[in-house]
Image: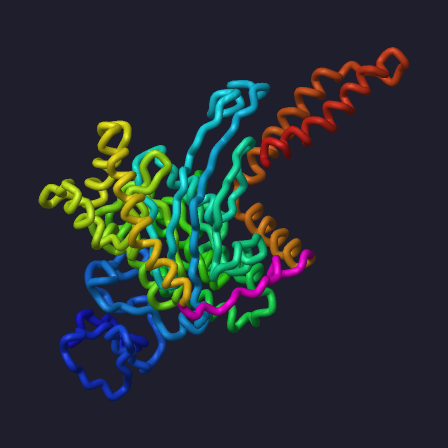
Amino acid sequence: KPIWRMKDANVTYIAADTETKTDVNAGSQSANGMTVLNIGIHTPDVATPGPMSSCGSPSLVDYKNHKVGLSVNLKESVKVRDVKFCFRFTNVKVKVAVPKWMPAFSTPGVPGQTKHILRGISGTVHSGQVLAIIGASGSGKTTLLDQLSLMPMMPGGKMTGRVEVNGCPVSQAFFKSKCAYVNQDDRLWGALTVFENLEIASKLYEPKLSSIKRRGKIEEVLRATGLLSCQQTKVGNALIKGISGGQRRRVSIAVELMGSPAILFLDEPTSGLDSKSAAEIMQLLGLLAKDLNVLIICSIHQPSSRTFFAFDLILLLSKGRACYFGPANDSVGYFAKRGFQAPPNMNPADFLIEISNPDFTEKSQVDRLILEWETFYSEELKNSDEKKLGEAYEETEEPEMYASGLAWQVWVLVHRMALSYMRDPGAYIGRAVLYVTMSIIFGVIYVGAEREQEHVLDYLFAIAWGMATPSYMAVSAG
């Protein structure tokens, strides 16, 4: 008995009720209970459990409650990885020592003092799992995510500890070829369409892919992210009206999917989104993890109840230390056994952050939570993690740093810049007005300069201004 209403007969899959034994001659039963029907191609209007969004994507729900899967074509295009990865971080500590000579206005810290941001964070994540880093403001979520993804430190910062994949230290070459990072602020080209943003990324990630295969892969990624019907819509910026905020976030994820990452890092993927858009993003991440075997690590500020229980693992931080690391479904029970009972109908994420927030909770309570977790982790979870590391994981080889050559990168980027300039009036109209205005001003200033020896300095300064003004404009544009 299908759970979903079908909008068209030309679809590749439906989700079937796992409790009902349905005999489908044209399909096959997968391991997760989803019946896959190979009866045609996808259309933008795939299985729709509810009202359609403005982009034509189905209303998504918690992937743990419904057996919904990504299409077989997408799995082939994005390369479902048979290699399993074990991402482990051990005793990660971060401190920032601000030099005494540094001016106070140039640093968020205090000159001459050392600030400890992270104090020994450990955890293990496997392929196919989603880890969410949660905690109150200032607990160290973004700092931990940045260090796990090899982001540069601020001046005076120092990180100690181990970050490993399959027992080997994570290198820059491994990160560039196997990992992807989605920033909190969407870094897209507003004058380009959704399709063109993905096409540019595909050309850089896979330069040898044929045009037909590249277009097919882009369409499969667009379909999986619910962006197929708005693929020819511009992303938009301050001057150009484009897609919505939730769609922009999905485009950012889709861009990184073009590189077929094995490990995906996301900084606040649901920040600034409404509950429906946030649910769609988390639904998508869950499907990527389960169906494409992607290891996902994200920091998230205040997830809803549905979003919270969609995570496989959560890491609760407070004052730069861990208060809990483990399955999201077990977190409330863990704190209930220690005397912290969650009120009925309260968002579990809000409850965990409330009891561990050092700004609004007694210091002794927060210290107790941290101490009890460190004792519990050292006695039980460390032993289980050691056993997991004994499983057969394939050794990671040192990959190439870049997927495409320098000449090809320059050509693709110049083409992207040319398209952006031709379509975005804000890229050149404002500069043209400023250039004309400055030319008139300098012309009026030096209108009386004659070709005589006494006016040499006037000509010299006019030439200097003529050279300096474009330079200043280039700096401000950068």
Q: What residue is rendered at 75% in x and 17% in y?
A: 447
Seen in the picture, residue 45 relative to 161 is either above or below; the reply is below
* Magenta segment main secondary structure: loop
Please state the horizontal and vertical placement of residue 324, each as a whole percent of the image: 28, 46
Task: Assess whether residue 365 is covered by the magenta stretch.
Answer: no
In the drawing, does residue 440 fall left or right of residue 8? right
Query: What residue is drawn where x is 55% and y is 31%?
Result: 156
Query: Percent from the top left, x then y, of residue 230?
Result: 38, 58
Q: Residue 216: x, y in percent?
A: 46, 71
> From where the camera sits, is residue 288 visible?
no
Please identify the residue farthest to the bottom as the structure is shown.
25
Count of numbered badges drawn on the protein = 0
Depth check: give the residue in front, 415 or 82: 82
Pinpoint residue 95: horizontal percent, then vertical percent.
47, 34
- Relative to residue 1, is residue 405 drawn left or right? right
Q: Is residue 181 visible?
A: yes
Region in magenta: 391-406
Q: Does residue 167 appear to the left or right of 300 in the view shown?
A: right
From this viewpoint, which residue is outermost toward the left? Answer: 344
> Farthest top residue?
454
